[in-house]
Amino acid sequence: LALWQSRCALHRQRGVSANNQSFCTHFASKLHRAAVPGLVTGILWTMGNFLSVHATEYLGMSVGFPLTQTCILINASWGIFFFHEIDLRSNRGQLFRFLLAL
């Protein structure tokens, strides 16, 4: 983001052609549309991190930390079974390794 901003500022200062200016305005319009999902994702991650620290504090390190790290397995399961990121019919070996890891 900082590189993009410095590039657009440099182009404005030098008076570069309209083609580069249109890139800067196009990217700026996309930036506003991407800001809301980025902020929501950051807020959710912050809440999850905050709560995992408190879970580890109250449950103890031997129970709380592994419990909070199961999110990796849950996210992998969502990706495989709900979003179909891996074709299970043709990749039975990957499914077997995934279930073995569980």
Image (cartoon, rainbow, N blue to C red):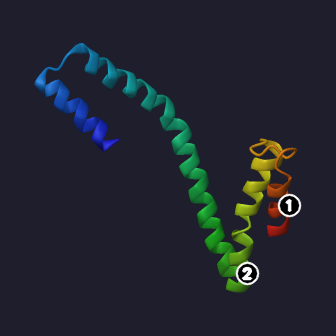
Q: Using the rendered image of the protein, determine whether residue 102 is visible from the camera's viewpoint.
A: no
Where residue 100 sits, quadrant-wise, is bottom right
Tell which circle, 2 or 1, labels the residue nearer the N-terminal end.
Answer: 2
Q: Residues within 10 Å of mark 1 (few under 14, many from 20)?
A: few
Q: Position of residue 27 (x, y in %)?
A: 39, 27
Tell me: 32 left or right of 4: right
Are the residues tagged 2 and 1 within 8 Å (C-beta)? Answer: no
The N terminus - image quarter? top left
Q: Amino acid at mark 2?
A: Leu
- On the image, the x and y values in percent for residue 79 come to 75, 48
Q: Can residue 65 be seen in this snapshot?
A: yes
Q: What residue lies at 75% left-to-right and 62% top-to-bottom?
A: 73
Determine the CA span between mark 2 and mark 1: 32 Å
Amino acid type indicated by mark 1: Phe
**What residue is shown with label 2?**
59
Dot 1 falls on a residue whose secondary structure is helix
Q: In screen coordinates, is 65 left or right of 30?
A: right
Residue 78: horizontal and vertical position, in percent? 78, 50
Q: Residue at x 72, y 85 (%)?
A: 62
Return the residue nearer the eye: 56 or 75.
Answer: 75
- In the figure, 3 relative to 53: above or below? above
Residue corresponding to mark 1? 96
